[in-house]
Structure formats: structure tokens, C-alpha cells
């Protein structure tokens, strides 16, 4: 259901149906159907605050309507696979039908492929619009970091981000290619550029794209959340589509030649030292004059790209881990051996939980139903009064009132201690 919201958001932002389909990992016909249903239902972006995902789903999909267009295979992929020994059109059709049961029959499949082949003498050259796309990937090369005490080394990963129209680039070293480092590099890249593009094009990296599937590329939920925070789209480069990745691969090659090659004989004892050296060299790269064009990457960025970038939100994106949890009979969920309340009416329901360093946010059908400071100790219990049923509130307040009266006779410090324990007691 989150995909419905994302389709409407991106459509309102001017993205084409094909781009939206690539971003959310659905067929273009699915996007077109969703947009049509929203238009007919009078639903437009931005959505009303009270319209949760369950209501949105029910509003747009009261009746199932068969798709008017048949999902098409990726003909370029078929062409590449048919060059491999033992691969036949029949095998590829069977794989296509396994993913798209309502797809073409074999005779139509073969006929459409032959028609596509006749059009392939035409080649499209991409022209990049300023502020439109940012291409991101990791370099194939790494840089060793040496432990000053033990002499042991580990490989730092090199993140590269290149704007499409100006080739203006951001480079940094990170400890890994895992999701927190991946998204952290994105945040710092946007801060370096001073704005956000309309779309980010990653390679099918595991951190960003959960499956590099031909027909269903699937965006990591945290990556999608990052995209929503900066109001941009994620358009993964398609598997075996070299033109999708040409810009960033060229950028990576230039970084390897003009930055990493110059660092090959240096010894670094920390990421901070490595990134300081990279920062000096990326300034050189971005201000180095072009050979065949006037100016440099920075001048083209300042003239063309920067004015077209979107302003960044006041608050930078903070990485959060998403989990699923079931509400216990005591209207709490358990996260890392700590307990957080939700409205008691959700007992037995499944909820989505977003964990950041300092907060726990709980969602039901996309609607925020609970927010708590994240407990730093196991066994802690955080309960909101509004989440309790009235009879529980009455019993607790009656008992607490009597206890506070007794504590008042001892002193104000005792009263404060009792109130704190009532709201933050350990789970039994």
C-alpha cells in the first residue's frame, strides 16, 4: 500500500509512468491504473492527513479491474541471454510467464521480439537535464586503513556520486557498503551539492535494491524513506543495461585515475585522514579545466546544475531501521527487550516499527500511532496514558494517587521518584 502513496507523490512531481514504474518496482500498466483510479476517485497529492493507507487502498480499489495492457518482457535482456549457449526463446518465454502469468503466449512473444529486433539499428544518446539525475555507486578499488597499534589493515569503500549534466562529483570513504553507510553517504553528497536532484540512479547494489530482478526491482524500505524525505525518486539502473550506468561508471573511472591512483603509496591510519586527502583531490578534479569544453565541472555546476537543484529540508535524513512487530495483550510491543505502548485497540495487530538512535516510531497502515524515546536498557517500559483503556487508567490513577499521598509525607524527592517509576518501570 505504500506504493500507492509513492505513485501519487511522484506523479504529482512530474515523473513519467515509466520512471515511476522503475522507481517503485512495478509494471508501467500498474502505475497507469493507479493514477487513473486516483483521478476517478478525486484523490490528489498531497493526501489529506487523515487518509491512512488502508482507507486509500479501499478508496482506489473497490473493485478489481483487469489490466488493459499485457506486461512486456525486456527485449534487450532477451537478446543478451539468447547469445548464451543452451538458452532458447522457449526457455526465456517460460521464465517470463513464471513472473507474469497473464503475459503473452509463446507465438506473440516471439513475434514481438522479432519486431523489436528490426528497430535496434536506431541508438538513443542520452542528454542529461540539469538537476535531473544524480548517479551513485562504489568504486571497484578500495583503500587500506592501517591500525596504528597492531599494523592490521582493512579496506575502506569509496562512494562516488556524479551529477548528470555537469559531472560535478562527490567522493568519500566509508567503513562498509552496508545500508547505514550507503545512506549516510547520500546525505553528505546532497549537503555537498547544496540541493537535491529529481532522481537518484544507483546501480543494483544490495544495500539499495533488495533484488536485481529483471521484472521486479524492489527498493529497500529505508532507501525509499530517504527518497521521500528529500522528495526525489530512486531509479535503479537496469541489469545488463550499460547505458543506464554509463555516467557513474565513467565518474568512477575518473575518480580511480585522478584520486585513488594518487593515494596508492600513502598510508592512512583512519577514515578521517583518508577523507581529508580525498577532499583535497576532489576539489582539484572538480576545478580541473575540460579538454574539449570551456570551463570545468564546478563552473558548469554553478552555471547549470546548482540553480536546478531542489532545496534541502531543514532537517537531514536520519537512518532508521524498519521492523515488524505484533501488539501484545498488554497493548505493548517488544523491541530489543524493551516495551512500548500503542493504542489498546490494536491488540493482536501487526505494526511497522522505525528505530533510530534515539526514538521509536510505530505505524499501523502507514499512520503514526505511537512515538517513544528509545530505551537504553533492557526491560524498560514506556507507556502513554492515551494508549490505555479507561478502566486501566482508573485503577492505575487510584493506586498512584494513594501512593503519592504517602510519598508526600516523606518529601518531594520521594514524590518525583514514584512518578518516574510509574512512567518508566521495568517490564515484569
Image: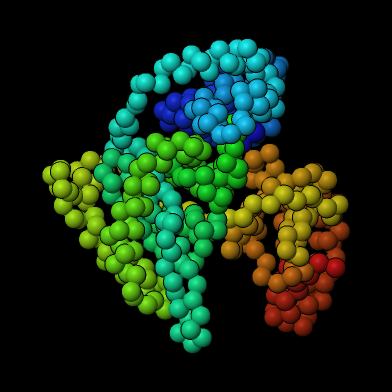
Report the number of numbered marks: 0
Residue 359 placement: quadrant: bottom right
Q: Position of residue 79 (x, y in %)?
A: 51, 27
Closest to the observer, 352 or 179: 179
Closest to the observer, 30 or 82: 82
> Farthest front residue?
85
Q: Position of residue 337 (x, y in %)?
A: 76, 65
Residue at 68% from the left image edge and 18% from the top image edge: 102
Q: Position of residue 187 (x, y in %)?
A: 43, 54
The answer to whether 115 appears left or right of 415 in the picture is: left
Q: Position of residue 198 (x, y in %)?
A: 39, 38
The answer to whether 296 appears left or right of 387 in the picture is: left
Figure check: 128 above or below 276: above
Q: Give the position of the N terminus as an image quadrant.
A: top right
**Does residue 111 appear anywhere in the picture?**
yes
Residue at 47% from the left image edge and 58% from the top image edge: 184
The answer to whether 324 appears left or right of 177 in the picture is: right
Residue 56 placement: quadrant: top right
**Rendering colour mode:** rainbow
> Farthest left residue?
294
Closest to the observer, 122 or 340: 122
The answer to whether 413 appears left or right of 331 in the picture is: left
Closest to the observer, 100 or 343: 100
Q: Give the position of the C terminus as an image quadrant.
A: bottom right
Residue 414 placement: quadrant: bottom right
Residue at 53% from the left image edge and 18% from the top image edge: 113
**Does residue 312 appear anywhere in the picture?**
no
Residue at 86% from the left image edge and 58% from the top image edge: 395
Amino acid at each position: 500500500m505504500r506504493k500507492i502513496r509513492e505513485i501519487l507523490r511522484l506523479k504529482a512531481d512530474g515523473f513519467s509512468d515509466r520512471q515511476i514504474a522503475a522507481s517503485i518496482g512495478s509494471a508501467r500498466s500498474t502505475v497507469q491504473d493507479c493514477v487513473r483510479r486516483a483521478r476517478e476517485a478525486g484523490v490528489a497529492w498531497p493526501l489529506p492527513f487523515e487518509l491512512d493507507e488502508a482507507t486509500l487502498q479501499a478508496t482506489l480499489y473497490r473493485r478489481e479491474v483487469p489490466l488493459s495492457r499485457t506486461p512486456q518482457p525486456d527485449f534487450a535482456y532477451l537478446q543478451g541471454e539468447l547469445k548464451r549457449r543452451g538458452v532458447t526463446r522457449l526457455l526465456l518465454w517460460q521464465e517470463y510467464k513464471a513472473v507474469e502469468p497473464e503475459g503473452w503466449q509463446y507465438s506473440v512473444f516471439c513475434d514481438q521480439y522479432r519486431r523489436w529486433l528490426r528497430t535496434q539499428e536506431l541508438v538513443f544518446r542520452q542528454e542529461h537535464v540539469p538537476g535531473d539525475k544524480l548517479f551513485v555507486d562504489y568504486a571497484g578499488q578500495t583503500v587500506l586503513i592501517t591500525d596504528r597499534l597492531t599494523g592490521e589493515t582493512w579496506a575502506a569503500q569509496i562512494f562516488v556520486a556524479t551529477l548528470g549534466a555537469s559531472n560535478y562529483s562527490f567522493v568519500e570513504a566509508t567503513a562498509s557498503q552496508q545500508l547505514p553507510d550507503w545512506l549516510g553517504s547520500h546525505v553528505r553528497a546532497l549537503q555537498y551539492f547544496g540541493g537535491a536532484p529529481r532522481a537518484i540512479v544507483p546501480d543494483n547494489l544490495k544495500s539499495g535494491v533488495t533484488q536485481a530482478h529483471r521484472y521486479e526491482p524492489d527498493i529497500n524500505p529505508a532507501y525509499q524513506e530517504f527518497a521521500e524525505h528529500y522528495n526525489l525518486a530512486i531509479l535503479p539502473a537496469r541489469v545488463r543495461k550499460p547505458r543506464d550506468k554509463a555516467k557513474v561508471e565513467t565518474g568512477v573511472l575518473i575518480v580511480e585515475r585522478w584520486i585513488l591512483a594518487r593515494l596508492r603509496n600513502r598510508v592512512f591510519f583512519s577514515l578521517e585522514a583518508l577523507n581529508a586527502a580525498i577532499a583535497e583531490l576532489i576539489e582539484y578534479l572538480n576545478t580541473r579545466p575540460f579538454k574539449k569544453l570551456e570551463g570545468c565541472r564546478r563552473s558548469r555546476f554553478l552555471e547549470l546544475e546548482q540553480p536546478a537543484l531542489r532545496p534541502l529540508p531543514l532537517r537531514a535524513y536520519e537512518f532508521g531501521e524498519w521492523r515488524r512487530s505484533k501488539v501484545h495483550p498488554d497493548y505493548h510491543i517488544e523491541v530489543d527487550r524493551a516495551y512500548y505502548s500503542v493504542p489498546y485497540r490494536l491488540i493482536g495487530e501487526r505494526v511497522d516499527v522505525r528505530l533510530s538512535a534515539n526514538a521509536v516510531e510505530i505505524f499501523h497502515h502507514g499512520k503514526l500511532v505511537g512515538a517513544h524515546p528509545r530505551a537504553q536498557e533492557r526491560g524498560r517500559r514506556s507507556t502513554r496514558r492515551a494508549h490505555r483503556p479507561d478502566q486501566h487508567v482508573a485503577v492505575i490513577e487510584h493506586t498512584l494517587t494513594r501512593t503519592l499521598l504517602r510519598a508526600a509525607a516523606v518529601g518531594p524527592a520521594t514524590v518525583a521518584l514514584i512518578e518516574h517509576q510509574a512512567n518508566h518501570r521495568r517490564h515484569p
